Amino acid sequence: MTPSLALLLLLALVGCSSGQTVSLSCTQVPGALVQIDAGNGQVFGVNSAGMIYTLYSGSWTQLPGALTHVSVGAAGVWGVNRGNLIYKLVGAEWVQTQGLLKQVDAGGAQFISGANMNDDIFCLGNSATVSVKDGSALPWVNIEGKLKYYSCGPLGCWGVNSADDIYYRFGSTPSSCQGSSWQQVEGKLSMIEVGSDRSVYGVNSAGDMYRRNGISASNPLGSSWSQVTFGGRKFKHVSQDLGKLWVITTDQAIFKCQL
């Protein structure tokens, strides 16, 4: 990855309804990525050529293999490639697992979720994810509905469909990852991510980034969206972990913001 100069920027969280603005400090991180995921204190990403990187001691370290999407969380490190093949990082090697997905999420409580090339939704319970060691058959559960992006966290799962409609899934647990029912949430997003602290961020088709407000154990759907902006930039991907927001812009620049 090509190093670049660290740049301190100001990130403004603009409330859509209240008009309030909260300023955060963001630092540009050297390199270029098209997708990033943070979880369990680790950060992984892939670039436009499919090269895989992890952040180690403040520097990007390239891993072997090629992926289009990578995810890290309580269920470990998982990824998918251009052929929709699914891999789990076991030790220092990528082990192919059974199934096909175009997008995978390891942010659930030791369970895996994702969407395939037909927008079918799948999850894998915790008893199966922790024991994956080879390409043997896995008990993937097909969840009703169609989504192009699906992400889970401590208070449930969120997803978006091909029309960019947003949905929340009730009842997802480590042993019953399929959940119980859907509820549509107002707004339009093209991708969505649930953070380890329950936070929900997403990006729409115009490159605008949003944060869900008011999420709690008693109100897991939250109450409203706030737009996240800085420097007139447009965004492609976002992920949050341990009080840090990791952002990829449409020109593949990487930013780390302190929340």
Image (tube, rainbow, N blue to C red):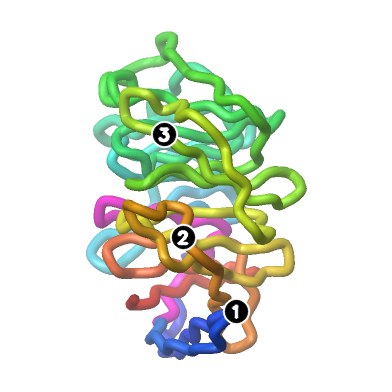
Residue bearing mark 3: 171
Numbered mark located on residue 191 in the image: none
Q: Is residue 253 magenta?
A: no
Find residue 89 and report its horizontal and vertical position in percent. Answer: 34, 34
Callout 1: helix, strand or loop? loop
Q: How far apart are the alpha carbons under marks 1 and 3?
A: 29 Å
* Residue at image point 26% right, 51% down: 40
> Does residue 19 lie above or below 141 as drawn?
below
Task: Tell whether label 3 touches label 1 (CB within 8 Å).
Answer: no
Q: Which badge, 2 or 3, is on the more N-terminal residue?
A: 3
Question: Bounds of the magenta span?
Answer: 27-44
Residue type, mark 3 in image = Gly
| Figure quadrant of residue 97 | top left
Q: Which badge, 2 or 1, is on the more N-terminal residue?
A: 1
> Does residue 117 lie above or below 20 as drawn?
above
Residue bearing mark 2: 222
> Does residue 183 lie above or below 119 as drawn?
below
Quarter of the image with the C terminus in it: bottom left
Q: Is residue 175 visible?
A: yes
